[in-house]
Image (spheres, rainbow, N blue to C red):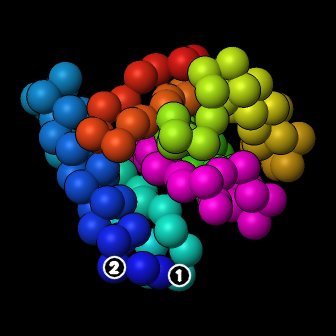
Amino acid sequence: MKQETKAFLEMLASRRAAQLEKQDPTVRALHVVDEHSPRAVVKTERQGKVVAFEFIETAETAALQCNMEDYVFVANEFGDVTVALPASSYARDIAATVLTDLKGRIRRSGAIGEFRFSGYLYDEMGNFKKLM
């Protein structure tokens, strides 16, 4: 992965973690940039217990079948999956369609029971806009 991409993902994940902590002071958000593919993950904990994961995908990793295992695992273990897509690669309407399809694919790929799914678009400045 290019250093530029890694630095950008680090900035995005750091900002998102800070936003989550500001929205709910009872949570602690930690983030990591995947060393093998250009994506980041934000983990949210409350009282030491993991309550949610957010996947910040890039144009290269968005909606890839190989990421489905991660989404299904999080849906089954924690009940809350969030995926963020880059606004530079997805128009709002297309992103909403991709995210809706992704939610259905998570369910069909092995998610057991109910889970919450949220979808966001993010821009180059690190702003996140909720789509679903």
Residues marked 2 and 1 touching at CB (< 8 Å): no
Q: Looking at numbered disc 1 in the image, what kind of residue is underneath it?
A: His
Q: Residue pushed farthest right?
A: 108
Residue at x 13%, y 28% (from the top left corner): 22
Closer to the camera in the image, 42 or 60: 60
At which x and y percent is residue 62? 65, 51
Q: Looking at numbered disc 2 in the image, what kind of residue is underneath it?
A: Gln
Q: Does 50 appear in magenta?
A: yes
Q: How many marks?
A: 2
The residue that disc 1 covers is 36
For mark 1, give the secondary structure. loop
Q: Residues within 10 Å of mark 1 (few under 14, many from 20)?
A: few
Closer to the camera in the image, 61 or 91: 91
For mark 2, give the secondary structure. helix
At which x and y percent is residue 126? 29, 40
On the question of residue 117 being in view, the answer is no
The part of the chain drawn in magenta is 47-68
Cα gap from disc 2 to disc 1, whole angstroms: 13 Å
Closer to the camera in the image, 114 or 103: 103
Q: Is residue 125 above or below residue 41?
A: above
At which x and y percent is residue 77? 57, 49
Q: Which label was assigned to residue 3?
A: 2
Residue at x 80%, y 59% (from the top left corner): 65
Task: Tell whether 90 sits left or right of 21.
Answer: right
Q: Quadrant of residue 11?
A: bottom left
Residue at x 74%, y 33% (from the top left corner): 98
On the question of residue 58 being in view, the answer is yes
Q: Is residue 3 above or below residue 50?
A: below
